[in-house]
Image: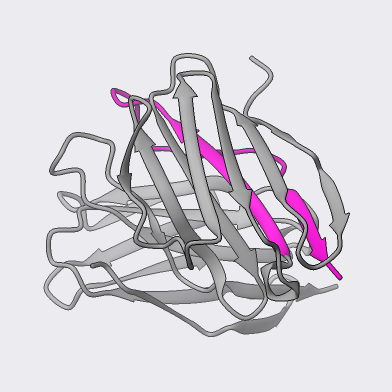
Amino acid sequence: DAGVIQSPRHEVTEMGQEVTLRCKPISGHNSLFWYRQTMMRGLELLIYFNNNVPIDDSGMPEDRFSAKMPNASFSTLKIQPSEPRDSAVYFCASKKREGTGELFFGEGSRLTVL
Amino acid sequence: GENVEQHPSTLSVQEGDSAVIKCTYSDSASNYFPWYKQELGKRPQLIIDIRSNVGEKKDQRIAVTLNKTAKHFSLHITETQPEDSAVYFCAASSDLRGSQGNLIFGKGTKLSVKP
């Protein structure tokens, strides 16, 4: 398996622009998580899905952030409009319900908002 | 919700010495405690985990201990090597709803092992 695949790996955009981050979980995994990593706040859970259904989005910072999982093999995290304080590395991760509990992370998407 | 505190935030040791990282958690329902290692510019990866029915677990040079009464758990690395240099994250989760509970991470410990 190729692991969790995220795109883009790097994105530089200007304040006010829309940003869409994409994630393909490992096949057979039915839980998907979006985390944001910054030096100040560490790894913050933004939202997670079980069987494509959002379970907990209390970590989503504000209405500018939205996430979808239209099917078991694809999820998006959208920021509209983007702001400089959104600059961070965004990780997608997945795990298997019947598995050991191990979370498999993608390589991350590094977002810079100017 | 769960809150995980981790310390120290930075730790510097000489090669061959031991390193200890400590975490506390708030939710008494948490019963799964993994540790992740993140090398510079890379993704976090699981190195060891422990469940609440076990007090200690060891895997070669790394070990984890858990004290459920006090709600704290620790990572111990013995005979440290330069390749152990990385950021280490502890996490806590409850799988009361099956193994799909979300993982809440501590803020990380940057370990530097000096040759």
Point 18% across, 34% down: residue? B98
Seen in the picture, residue B103 relative to B12 is either above or below; the reply is: above
Decide whether residue A101 is among the magenta residues: yes
Residue A50 visible to an observer of this rendering: yes
- Using the rendered view, name the quadrant where residue A96 is placed: top left
Seen in the picture, residue B92 relative to B106 is either above or below; the reply is: above
Seen in the picture, residue A16 relative to A80 is either above or below; the reply is: below
- Using the rendered view, name the quadrant where residue A24 is placed: top right
Callout count: 0
Residue closest to the eye, A24 or B53? A24
The quadrant in which the C terminus of chain A is found is bottom right
Decide whether residue A64 is among the magenta residues: no
Point 45% across, 58% down: residue? A45
Point 28% across, 23% down: residue? A98
Could you say where residue A62 lies in the image, as x and y percent from the top left? 48, 67
The quadrant in which the N terminus of chain A is found is top right
Q: Which residues are magenta?
A: A88-114
Answer left or right for A75 relative to B31. right
Residue closest to the eye, A102 or A90? A90
Could you say where residue B4 lies in the image, as x and y percent from the top left? 35, 72
Residue B44 visible to an observer of this rendering: no
Could you say where residue A103 lies in the image, as x and y percent from the top left? 47, 39
